[in-house]
Image: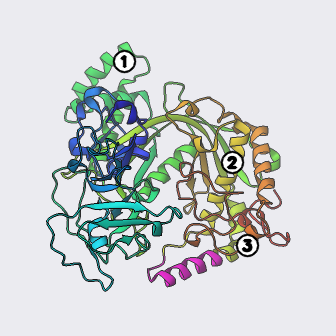
Amino acid sequence: MRAEDSRVRQSQLVSTFGVGSILPAGEQSYPVCGLDDWDERWCAPVEEPRLAKSLGVHHFRSPSTGQRRGDVPVVRFPAFQYCPGCRRLDNYWKFDSRRMQCPECVRELTPSRFVACCENGHLEEFPYYQWVHRMADGRESQEKVAEHRMTLLTRGASSSLADIVVHCSCGVPARDLDGAFNKNAIAMVKPCGGRRPRLPGSEHEACDKNLRALQRGSSNVWFGAVRSSISIPPWSSPNARYVTRFWEVFHDRDDNHIRVAAEGAAARDRTIDVEGVLEVVAQRRGVERARIPTEAELRAEEYLALRDGNDAGSSDAFQCIEVEVAPEVSGVVAQVSRVSRLREVRALHGFSRVTPMATDGTEPKLARLSAAPRDWLPAIEVYGEGVFVRVDEAWLAHWEGGAVAKQRGRMLEAAITLRAKESGAPAVEVPTSRFLAMHTLAHAVLKELSLNAGYPVGALRERVYAADGRAGFLIYTASSDAAGSPGGLAAPANEDRFADVLVAAASRAEWCSNDPVCAESGPSGSDGLNLAACHACLLLPETSCEDRNIYLDRVSLVGGLEGAEAGLLTGM
C-alpha cells in the first residue's frame, strides 16, 4: 500500500476510520487493526480523568500522527479479488499477490464489492462459493471436481444485483446476486463464523447472529461508539495540566514531595499554583477511588459548569462568561454565555455493524477494540468555542403543561410503540417533551448560527442538556481542521446578535419548503422517530447531531400551521 493512498486525518481514526472500519486506499481496502498492534510509543497520551473513569480505562492515547515507524497498522481485506479483464474471482494470493495483478491479463485486481457482517461486529468474506453452490431447494451441490474456478460476470442490462452473476467451473448453474441483500439471505447459506480481521491471529468467536450482505464501502459496515466530554474546572486549569503531565509520579507520592515539585514548577510558570496542584491531586485520587460515573452524571457536571461560568483567564482551557439577554427574548431565554475557549476529548470505546441499535431495541453489543484488555482507548483532543443557551425554566414548564407538548409526546410514543409492534422488538424509551423541544431548538439555532457566523454546518456540533432540572444546549465548534478556530462563533453570544439569531431561527422554523407535508405528516425519518422534521428544515450532518438526527419536531417550537396551538417559541 502506497503511503499517499492511505493518508487520513488523525481525528478520522476515532470518528470515521477507527478500529475495525474498512479504510479505502487507492484500489484496495484495509481494516484498521486493533489496539494490540498499535505502537504506543507513537501514540501521545491524552488525559481526561472523568471520561476515562466512566469508560473503565486509565487514560487515552491519540492515534499516531503518521511517522513512518508509527503508522496505524492495517490488514488487507477482503481476500476475494477479481480481475476486470478475465473476470476471475479468487483469493488474492492465488493471483500475483506482490503486484496485486492478474498474471494472465496483467490487470490490477479489484476487491470484492460485497462483504458479510453481523450485529456482533464480526466481518468476513461474502460467501460466493456457498452462494453459487446452494441449489434451489436449499441443498448444497455435491459436485466433486478437482478445482472450483469462479468468475464474476455482469449482464450489462442494468446495475442491479440481478445482473451480477457468479459462475463456477464445476458446472453448477450460475447464480445471480438478486436477493443477496435480503435480511436472511446469507444466513440461509452460511452461519456467522465469528471472524475478526481487525485482530490478526485471534481465535474466532461463537456467534448466534445472522450474517448480512453489505456493500464494502457502505456506512453501516461500521458504526463507531464515540463518547466525548468537555474539560471543566478544575480539570481544565494549568494546575490540572501540570498534574496530568506528571501523574505517574504523583499518584503514589505524599503531599510533601508533590509540594516541593510544584514549588519548582511555579517558579518557572506563574500560572501554576502550589495549593491548586495539591487540590487537583486530591480530587484526582478521589476520582480514581469513586464509582464509575454515568453519562448522565458527566452531563450534569458540564451543565453546572456552563451555568456557573468560568473567567479564569487565557491560561484555562475552559472560559465561559455570561452575557446580557436581550429584552425581546428574555421571556424564553434565561441565560446566554459566550464560551470563548473549550477543550473536548472524544474517545472511541467500541463499534457495531449493520445497525447502530440492536434489533431487540436495546443497546448494541459493542465489538471490542483489542483482543486483550487494555488500560487505554484511542481519543483525540480538540479546542474550540461556542455559545451556551439556558431556557427559562418557568417558560418551559408552562409549555410542558400545554396541549402541543402533550399531543406531540403522544404522537411520538405511538410511533415508537408501532415500530416495536411491527418489528416484534421491545419499544425504546420515549424521550420527554423537554428533550424533544431542546433538541429541536438546538438544531434550529445551530443552522442559524452557521449562516450568521460563517461556519459550515458540518463544523458545528450540539450538546443538549434536557434532564430534570436542566434545560439548555451548547452549540460549539471543536474541529481539528481550519474550521475549528476562526474565532467567530462566540461573537454571536453578544446581546443583540444572539437575539437576532434566535428570532430568525424561530421565523425560519415556521415554514419548511416541504410544508404542509412536513408539518402535517405523521412520524418520519429514521425508524419513524421524527415528527415535523426533514432535510429541508431541521436535519443536520451526522457529525453535528449527537442523537443520529432523531427526536426532532418543528411543531413543538412554532405550534401548528393554523396558529391555534402554541409552540415553545410562540409569543416570544
Magenta stretch holds residue 157? no
Residue 416 inside the magenta-drawn segment: yes
Q: Position of residue 472 (x, y in %)?
A: 62, 53
Dominant secondary-structure state across the stretch colored magenta: helix
Rendering colour mode: rainbow
Residue 542 drawn at (x, y percent): 54, 52
Q: Which residue position holds label 3?
A: 404
Name the mark nearer the viewer: 2 or 1. 2
Which of the numbered marks, if any, corresponds to residue 447? 2
Of the residues shown, which amino acid type is indicated by label 1?
Ala
Which portion, as a residue range, is magenta? Answer: 410-427
Specify few, some or many for label 2: CA neighbours under 10 Å numbering under 14, 14-19, or 20 or more. many
Using the numbered discs, state the Cα–Cα distance from disc 1 to disc 3 in whole angstroms: 58 Å
User: In the depicted view, which residue is nearer to us: 399 or 548?
Assistant: 548
The residue that disc 1 covers is 266
Q: Disc 3 vs disc 2: which is toward the camera?
A: 2
What crowding class fits label 1: few (fewer than 14 Cα within 10 Å), some (14-19), or many (20 or more)?
some
Label 3 sits on what residue type? Val
Q: CA distance from mark 2 to mark 1?
A: 44 Å
Looking at the rendered structure, the secondary structure element under dot 3 is helix
Q: Nearer the N terminus, badge 2 or badge 1?
A: 1
For marks 3 and 2 on the same chain, the one whose residue lies earlier in the sequence: 3
Q: What crowding class fits label 3: few (fewer than 14 Cα within 10 Å), some (14-19), or many (20 or more)?
A: many
Viewer-closest of 427 and 158 = 158
Residue 553 is situated, as x and y percent measured from the top left of the image, at 67, 65
Q: Can residue 416 be seen in this snapshot?
A: yes
Q: Is residue 276 visible?
A: no
Where is residue 121? Give x, y as percent.
32, 61
**Mark seen at residue 572:** none
Mark 2: secondary structure: helix
